[in-house]
Amino acid sequence: MFRSYGKAAVIAAVASACGYAGAATITVTGSSSNVSAEGAAAASASTNLGFTVDLNMGAFQSRDSVIRLSLGGISTARFATYNATTPSVACKDSTGAVTALDIDVTRNTTASSTWDFGIANTSGSTSTASCQFTSLAVVASTLGTGTLTVQSGVKRVSDSDFTYDTASAKPVLTVSSQITSISVLSALNGVVDYTDQQGLGFDDSGADAAPSGAAGFGDHLVIRVGSQEGMTLSSASTLTFTLNIEAESGKTFAWLDDDNNGALNNSTSNGRISAGTSVTLDTAKNTITYVSSAVFTGTSRDFTVSFSHKSATPSTGVAISPMTFAPSSATVSTLTNSALAIGSWTSNGTTAKIPYMPINTTPGSTKIDPIIILTNRSSVTGTVTVNVVNARGESCTGTLGTIDGGQTKSLGGAPLRSVLSACPAYNIAAGEAMNISLTATLPASTTELFTGYNAESGRVTVVNSLNGK
């Protein structure tokens, strides 16, 4: 009977009969399992990481064939040159004899991702030979983030590539950032002093020490950067920590830079911020870039950024503004945290409660217009913000504007209506009864407030927490 066989089946049968069907296997020993990416990047060109490869052949090997070891997983990784590290290879056959394969080591003079080893002679059972490649090494500075692997293949005299008796890739080492986290250990919580210093510094409620060369009280922001302990090459890394601090919308850090040069020079500027490698202020004066460098050899490192004023009696004018800081970004090496909640600066300025205030904007006898008159008898300019809660418990906030030193300003007409118009749940045309809280960045001792409303029967005075005491 005639039987027909496919071409593939015939090739497979011949390969099996000749002992070609097996596959080699690799075992890697002596490697550094966890390498600092930062330490590797900073390593000198002569810093190498050694490892050993045990290669078990799975097929018959012949003289003049070439074994190739290839690095993978990290495309930039390179073997050290022959002059830097001289590998040696010892092979045994299945009986334990050391002459199964006589290997000639190629003297590569350029770092490469491959290393070739020629088979100069054979004896014994080469299809089950076991070869140990010792003193192999990879150049540390060529390692990027990832898992470095090594694999092998054989090119016979009749082959054009290393596709015979291949061994699958096995891990050699893992390269990762030694930085694990960036977090806020202590947020900004300074209280701007409007009682004694008219906004020129912080009061003593936080009791933070001022930065070097400053007077009065300061406010500290502490950022903790976590790092891994015991990584290979970690002690070789000097890393740069960069923090960007953004002011609240509409506010600036201009008080820190009276020289208008953006460099925040602590020796000349009115304001004080703790020194880093460099501390700069952008042109708009609303973003501080704080840069510092350190060697990360432990599990964490803390960076402290402190604010204060140069003098206990600084120049006239509001210097420090209460503000809630925008989420800040901090970067160390490859890790960036862009949403750090770094706190706020509040104030000990004026607060006033108006427990009941009606409003009705419908023209005619029912129209009621609130009266809020603020007098600022200090020399500073302040900002007035408002929180309004109606009878249904619906809350709304806004800004009633600024008031200069020595001025009186009406805030209950257009300024209040402008805030209320942005409150979708309010219906001031039909009438609302409101509980109003005012906050002014002004000293309470020199701030006066009159409140009332105009109705059909005339002006009605409303008692507030300032004029009712």
Image: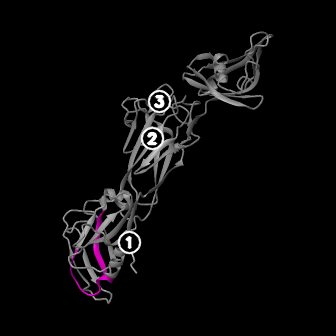
Q: Which residue is mark 3?
A: 314
In this picture, residue 136 sits left or right of residue 373: left
Q: Mark 1 is on which residue type?
A: Gly
Q: Residues within 10 Å of mark 2 (few under 14, many from 20)?
A: some
Q: Which residue is mark 2?
A: 244
Q: Earlier in the sequence, mark 3 or mark 1?
A: 1
**Quarter of the figure that contains the N terminus:** bottom left
Expressed as whole percent of the image width and height from the top left, the position of residue 291 reads 39, 44
Q: Earlier in the sequence, mark 2 or mark 3?
A: 2
Circle nearer the viewer, 1 or 2: 1
Determine if the magenta segment contains residue 81. no
Q: Is residue 271 visible?
A: yes
Give the residues drawn in magenta, as a range: 118-139
Q: Earlier in the sequence, mark 1 or mark 2?
A: 1
Determine if the magenta segment contains residue 137. yes
Q: Nearer the viewer, residue 291 or 164?
A: 164
Q: Secondary structure at mark 2?
A: strand
Q: Establish if 365 lies above or below 184.
A: above
CA separation, marks 1 and 2?
69 Å
Q: Residues within 10 Å of mark 1 (few under 14, many from 20)?
A: few
Circle nearer the viewer, 3 or 1: 1
Q: Which residue is mark 1?
A: 6
User: Which residue is rendered at x = 35% and y = 71% of the image?
Assistant: 7
In this picture, residue 382 sits left or right of residue 118: right
